Image: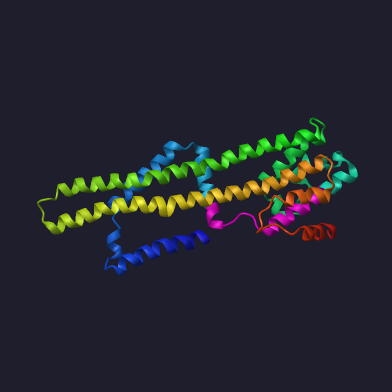
């Protein structure tokens, strides 16, 4: 929703300034300039990015319409889920976690926390981290490097759509110039048709440059930045899981492990230490 408001501001105030100087907004639209510019942009996108990254771009653009992926409630639920899981592991040993980490989709514990349970990527990340500890394949002190590498890979995947969109944004002004040159070529063929026709043709050609610059700095680049922030929010959510899980695996008490996870959070979504303690100790 915020993205839509931003576009309304950008487009609305741009057109308002044009009108205040005596312009007609309808004169800014020329299909013959729009099609080549956005055709070149779309074509470059397809050439640059593999199918997986193109799907990531579509997913990222859809996510920008939904806003921030996680709020304080998401993190409070996550910390409750981790705390209950850790208490279970503390009382019954790591083997007590087997039924939950080996079959997370059927876990009665995870189902109690719908926001976390519906986040299959996060649930798989937690379970994949605990599985080798539960079945004894690795020692607890080896868990951090394992989970850290998973985060590095995930970050690289999140960054690919941002990188591609950034390159498209950098290219759009040049595509606008190409469209403008095509318009000038057409204008040269009308040079004997009078100043009115030639002036209208030049105006149309110049709009090509306008479209390219506007699309770059007013549309594509802001969207790429927004997707980048969404990726950072996803990384922070995963980092809470990593830090808390590693601390617990290395012997920290469940409450302390969740406190370690809490400290990863930014101020706007981080519960106070006393608030976290009260929240966890009063869980049913």
Asked if residue 100 shows in the view, the reply is no
Which quadrant would residue 25 be assigned to in this image? bottom left
Residue 44 located left or right of residue 29: right
Q: Where is residue 2 in the image (x, y as percent from the top left)?
A: 52, 61
Q: Where is residue 235 in the image (x, y as percent from the top left)?
A: 63, 46
Q: Nearer the viewer, residue 241 or 277?
A: 277
Asked if residue 263 shows in the view, the reply is yes
Q: Position of residue 143 (x, y in %)?
A: 75, 36
User: Which residue sits at x=90%, y=43%?
Assistant: 92
Above or below, 167 against 262 in this view is above
Q: Which colour scheme is used?
A: rainbow
Q: Which residue of the protein is positioned furthest toward the right in this rendering?
A: 91
Residue 64 counted in the magenta span: yes
Above or below, 63 against 26 in this view is above
Q: Which residue of the protein is positioned furthest toward the top in this rendering?
A: 137
Q: Which of 272 and 239 is in front in this view?
A: 272
Main SS of the magenta segment?
helix
Residue 31 counted in the magenta span: no
User: Which segment is the magenta one?
Assistant: 62-85
Q: In which quarter of the image is the C terminus?
A: bottom right
User: Which residue sits at x=79%, y=31%?
Assistant: 138
User: Which residue sits at x=71%, y=34%?
Assistant: 146
Above or below, 282 against 256 in this view is below
User: Which residue sits at x=77%, y=51%?
Assistant: 259
Q: Where is residue 255 in the image (x, y as percent from the top left)?
A: 82, 51
């Amino acid at each position: 929703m915020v993205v839509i408001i931003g576009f309304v501001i950008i487009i609305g105030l741009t057109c308002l300034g044009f009108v205040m100087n005596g312009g007609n907004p309808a004169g800014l639209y020329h299909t013959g300039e729009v099609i080549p510019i956005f055709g070149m942009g779309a074509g470059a996108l397809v050439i640059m990015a593999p199918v997986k990254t193109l799907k990531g771009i579509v997913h990222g653009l859809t996510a920008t319409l939904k806003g921030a992926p996680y709020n304080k409630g998401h993190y409070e639920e996550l910390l409750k889920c981790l705390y209950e899981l850790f208490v279970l592991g503390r009382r019954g040993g790591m083997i007590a976690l087997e039924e939950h980490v080996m079959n997370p989709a059927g876990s009665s514990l995870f189902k109690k926390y719908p926001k976390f349970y519906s986040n299959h990527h996060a649930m798989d990340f937690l379970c994949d981290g605990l599985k080798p500890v539960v079945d004894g394949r690795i020692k607890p002190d080896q868990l951090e490097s394992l989970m850290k590498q998973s985060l590095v890979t995930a970050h690289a995947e999140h960054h690919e759509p941002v990188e591609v969109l950034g390159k498209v944004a950098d290219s759009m002004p040049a595509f606008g110039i190409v469209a403008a040159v095509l318009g000038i070529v057409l204008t040269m063929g009308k040079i004997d048709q009078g100043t009115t026709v030639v002036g209208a043709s030049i105006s149309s050609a110049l709009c090509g440059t306008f479209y390219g610059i506007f699309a770059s700095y007013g549309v594509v680049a802001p969207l790429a930045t927004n997707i980048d922030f969404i990726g950072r929010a996803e990384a922070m959510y995963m980092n809470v899981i990593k830090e808390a899980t590693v601390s617990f695996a290395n012997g920290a008490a469940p409450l302390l492990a969740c406190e370690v996870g809490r400290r990863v959070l930014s101020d706007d979504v981080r519960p106070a230490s006393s608030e976290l303690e009260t929240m966890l100790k009063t869980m049913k």
